[in-house]
Image (spheres, rainbow, N blue to C red):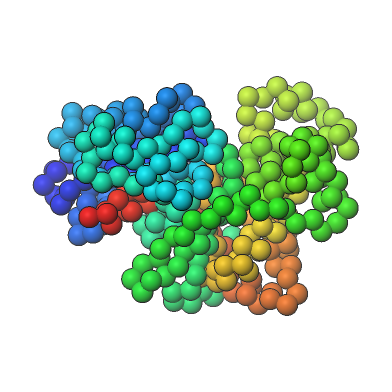
Amino acid sequence: MKTEEYDGFVLGGDVGGTNTNIAVAGEKDGEATLIYSAHFESRKLASLVPAIRVALEYGRENYGIEVDRGVVGVAGAVTDCSRIKPTNLSWVVDAEEIKRELGLKEFRIVNDFQLIGWGIASLKEEDLFEAKEGEPGFGETRGVIGAGTGLGKSILLFDGKRYVPIPSEGGHADFPIHNRFDLELADHIRAERKTPASYEDLLSGRGIERIYDFLRERRGRTEKTIEIEEAEDKAAAISKYKGTDPLCQETFRIYARCYGRCAKNFVLEALATGGLYIAGGIAAKNKEIFVSPDFQAEFLNAEKQRRILEKTPVRVITNYDVSIIGACNAAVLLR
């Protein structure tokens, strides 16, 4: 790589409840090009400073790169762009500390799903799986949703030049109950959590486990139950057997219906007819659930405004780097 090809260099990061990813990109004519990235387990970090330091030192030693500004996305309600405690971590992300310790001129914190919104413009066709065709119009509002450790959302508004992502904590909204089965599932969650069931309680890795546990209590055990219960990642084990084990299969059918309901409500609330983008590792690894009758029927289940949903395309993001690409894109705009 020739450093003189770029006007400067920026840092982008994504701090999740499970993983923290840091990237450095070159800036040229207002666009970011990813150069390298580093990956960490969030719970093994004492703060974000050591992770960023590792990434910056790698760039200096291997490319002669100096970075002067950065943006990180954090899972949580970002009301102050300079300091936040991530939802599922014990440490705080402090922009002033990061600038002071690492010599950066500009550093900003945004919601983690805003990063995905900033990254969508850089995605290619091969980075997207089309779950549902649609008829999006120019500049129409878009939505981003995704389940992982939790459930994130962002609304993308077009400002005449680009789509600007707006933060949301809609994943914590109450889960809507349609029938007795939903009520019993929600009561099962309430017994565990001591609070009403939210979308995130179902649409997350832990949510897959909760649905499975609920079904196991109702239906009984199967030959895969012991293996699943002993697995380090129960959600991944349930996914592994969703095509062969009846409990795992039903778990993902319910999960697909819940996802479809949440996606439908989000599109209607935001009038996101420009497209719904589904992000996160669960979606990328289980793309088929979004073309399933369970998801599709629930997504279109709106008597008065079905036409809005019919014209809205649904795409699954399969590029795992979308968040750090988006962070670097956002950092370029800091200049």
- Image position, residue 260 (x, y; %): 68, 58
Position of residue 98 measured from the top left corner of the image (x, y, whole percent): 31, 35
Residue at the (66%, 37%) spot, across then down: 206
Q: Is residue 316 visible?
A: no
* Nearer-the-camera pick, 56 or 274: 56
**Residue 214, quarter of the rendered image:** top right
Quarter where residue 118 is shown: bottom left
Residue 68 percent across, percent down from the top left: 21, 43
Q: Is residue 61 left or right of residue 197?
A: left
Q: Residue at x 61, y 51 (%)?
A: 171
Q: Residue at x 63, y 29 (%)?
A: 233
Q: Is residue 215 above or below residue 276?
A: above
Q: Is residue 66 left or right of residue 85?
A: left
Report if residue 77 is visible in the image: yes
Quarter that holds the C terminus: bottom left
User: What residue do we see at 63% from left, 59% from top?
Assistant: 263
Which quadrant of the figure contains the N terminus?
A: top left
Residue 306 in the image: above or below residue 1: below
Is residue 134 shown above or below 234? below
